[in-house]
Image (tube, rainbow, N blue to C red):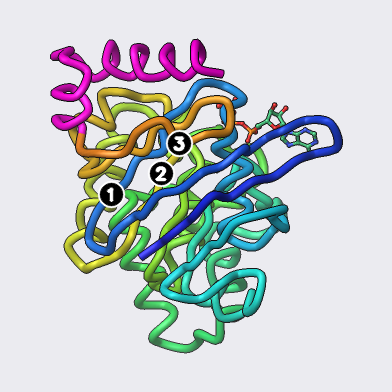
Amino acid sequence: MIEASDVRKHFGEVKALGGVSFTARDGQITALLGPNGAGKTTLLRLLVGLLARDHGSIAIGGVDPAVDPMSVRRNIGFLTDQFGLYERLTTREYLTYFGELNGMGGAALRQRIDEVADLLSLDDILMRHTKGFSQGQRIKVAMARTLLHRPRHLLLDEPSRGLDVMSTRALRHALTVLRKEGCCVLMATHVMQEVTHLCDDVIVIAQGHTVAQGSPEELCRRTGIANLEDAFVSLVGEEGIAA
Ligand SMILES: Nc1ncnc2c1ncn2[C@@H]1O[C@H](COP(=O)(O)OP(=O)(O)OP(=O)(O)O)[C@@H](O)[C@H]1O
């Protein structure tokens, strides 16, 4: 479970987060929805302990990343917009390297690489050097690295950007498998179709504040609007007026 309460963060004069609170549950895919600049990436970076918060509390599986960052890192997979591929390595070599960094090795690691390659349809790029990979290929390799050590918590920053239809389906299938295994998935996205079809719960943030949390159906009911995209615009608009 991922819990945040009144989390705030400033960058100098810029208020990136002014008070974000939510709970993302195990065995659920939770969407983090918000306009550009709402604070989604900042929130994810605070949750994984890459940034220090100014105020509030955070617990990842009950552990505060500011208190025990190593324990939190062992239990999370974080997909950022910085893929950090090593171009001289093949995909398999790259995944082997990261698996070994996570204490994996031998036949178990080889088997796990085969599993994630299968889950994300990586077979055609597994033996290729990552140099020159397309955006979609790069994100799939980064996603494989994120899943390799079977993290209990997955934090994904726009995981489907740049993916073609088949790769998007492979990613969605992978996420539903992880949900079934009890993983807690928190995913920043702008793709409403993805939220409607995949996500159990939605956190809406605008201007650094939590505006609403609920299932896609609940958000539609609450706003009296049948379509999630229009409900989202209505919720974000209300915050804009309130701010
Ligand atoms: N290192 C930084 N220094 C200064 N301002 C920052 C920094 N990082 C983020 N911000 C600001 O904090 C606010 C939130 O940014 P953030 O990247 O978290 O938004 P986002 O919701 O992820 O946006 P997008 O949907 O465009 O990716 C923005 O106003 C951004 O300019």
The quarter of the picture showing ligand 1: top right
**Mark 3 Cα shell of 10 Å, populated few (<14), some (14-19), many (≥20):** many
Spatial CA distance of label 2 from label 1 is 7 Å
**Is 96 located above or below residue 14 in the figure?**
below
Residue that mark 1 sits on:
29
**Is 184 located above or below residue 121 in the figure?**
below
Q: Nearer the viewer, mark 3 or mark 2?
A: 3
Q: Nearer the viewer, mark 1 or mark 3?
A: 3
**Is 92 located above or below residue 37 in the figure?**
below
Inspect the image, locate mark 1, and give the three-letter code of the amino acid beneath it.
Ile
Q: Position of residue 161 (x, y in %)?
A: 46, 30
Is residue 112 one of those drawn in magenta? no
Q: Are marks 2 and 1 in contact (CB under 8 Å)?
A: yes
Residue most extreme to the right: 12
**Main SS of the magenta segment?**
helix
Quadrant in which residue 178 is drawn: bottom left
The residues colored magenta run 216-243
Residue that mark 2 sits on:
187
User: Which numbered disc covers residue 210?
Assistant: 3
**Is 215 located above or below residue 49 in the figure?**
above
Label located before the other in sequence (1 or 3) = 1
Label located before the other in sequence (3 or 2) = 2
Inspect the image, locate mark 2, and give the three-letter code of the amino acid beneath it.
Met
